[in-house]
Amino acid sequence: VIERGTALGRGIAFSTTEEGHVLNVRAEAMGGFPDRIGDFVAWLEATGRPADPKAYVPRAVYGDYLEALAQPPLAAGALEVVRGTCIGLSETADGVVAELEGGRTLVGDYAAVATGNEGPLLDDAAQSGWDRNRAAIAPDAAVLIKGTGLTMVDQVIALGRIGHRGRVIAVSRRGLVPRPHVEPAAPPASLAPPLGAPLSATLRWVRAEILRNGDWRAVIDGLRPHSHALWQAWNAAEKRRFSRHLRPYWDVHRHRGAPAPVAVVEAARASGRLRVVAARLDPVREEDVGLVVGFRHRGSGAAETVIVDHVIDCSGAAVDPARVGNPLIASLLRGGFARADDSGVGLAVGDLGALIGADGTPSERLFALGPVARARYWESIAIAEIRAQCAALARRLTAAAPAEP
């Protein structure tokens, strides 16, 4: 494993130390293995932590769990962690070659690109919403947040922890805020989606199912086992249409927030400290009075300009491979070992996440896992989907490995 961070397996989501940054699903649904449901809860109990299966556990605790999973193979010598940044990956007739920053190279039989979500490209005035350090923001500072999704929720919580009491404006094109989970949760609806139907017909079917079931959460949860098939049955034009027009609505309903964090956001809105705006943002201008941000309201088209002290970009992961700024992705594209998918949401991948080269041929040695493989699966950012991808690829690679002498 080539890892540029100081901890193994935490990534962006689980590297936070904020107690209020909790998992967005209950503990009982989390764990590293698709065939060992309940493993995370069992680990909580074994390590003396609160082990309520229905609890929304701090994400830092789940990061501890992931690091603990790595300890047995590390101790046995079956896993090696190389600290560094991979800036190039290529395929040869005999295997794969990874190039690290500083000139070191590693050679293997296979490689899996599991780099996670790529952050948005920041303008000069903006801070990253994935940067946890907010100590430099004064209590009365005015803050504008670009984006109104789950990362915005994280930032409102983090600002509250440092005693921030100034005004916060969160702006996105549709002004949609994540919906909360509710208790008790309704069981997922049993559904038979119309695979291959146009996006408009699929949307009408979803609305009809919500009316029939009476609970939109049950219908959205019932779609989860079918999400890959739905996505793969659409042509590239339908996928682009979904990504452009319906993705924000899908995200706030499918990727719901834990009740407590969403309640913090709603309380901030009710008090007037947080304002959520549906608008299109203009580029930020740095002037003597501060950061000047103009935006045009959705629907009315009315223009508004605000002056703030800080801009935090929470607009979500970048999905265009040509614009992510990751040298590893750039090297794969440049070498023809990968190409952008026609859907416009990442790299083209085949079965088991095999990278599809510039010539259209799926690789037998280079694979993608997690968000990098979203063009194949769409739903490729949650634990349940990622662990299933990893398990399937692991079975494929171990089956192909030669027997030990």
Image (spheres, rainbow, N blue to C red):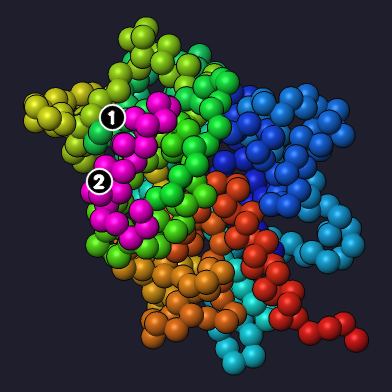
The image position of residue 88, as x and y in percent, is 53, 73
Tell me which numbered mark, 1 or 2, is placed earlier along the sequence: 1
Quarter of the image for residue 282 reads top left
Residue matched to label 1: 175
Whether residue 83 is visible here, answered yes or no, is: yes
The image position of residue 248, as x and y in percent, is 33, 40
Q: Is residue 140 left or right of residue 25?
A: left
Q: Return the mark for residue 11.
A: none
Q: From what the image shows, is residue 83 above or below residue 383?
A: below
- Circle 1: element type: loop
Quarter of the image for residue 91 reads bottom right
In the image, farthest residue toward the top: 271
Residue at 87%, 65% (x, y): give it.
77
Whether residue 166 is visible here, answered yes or no, is: no
Viewer-proximal residue, 270 or 161? 270
The stretch of residues the image draws in magenta is 194-216
Residue at 83%, 52% (x, y): give it.
71
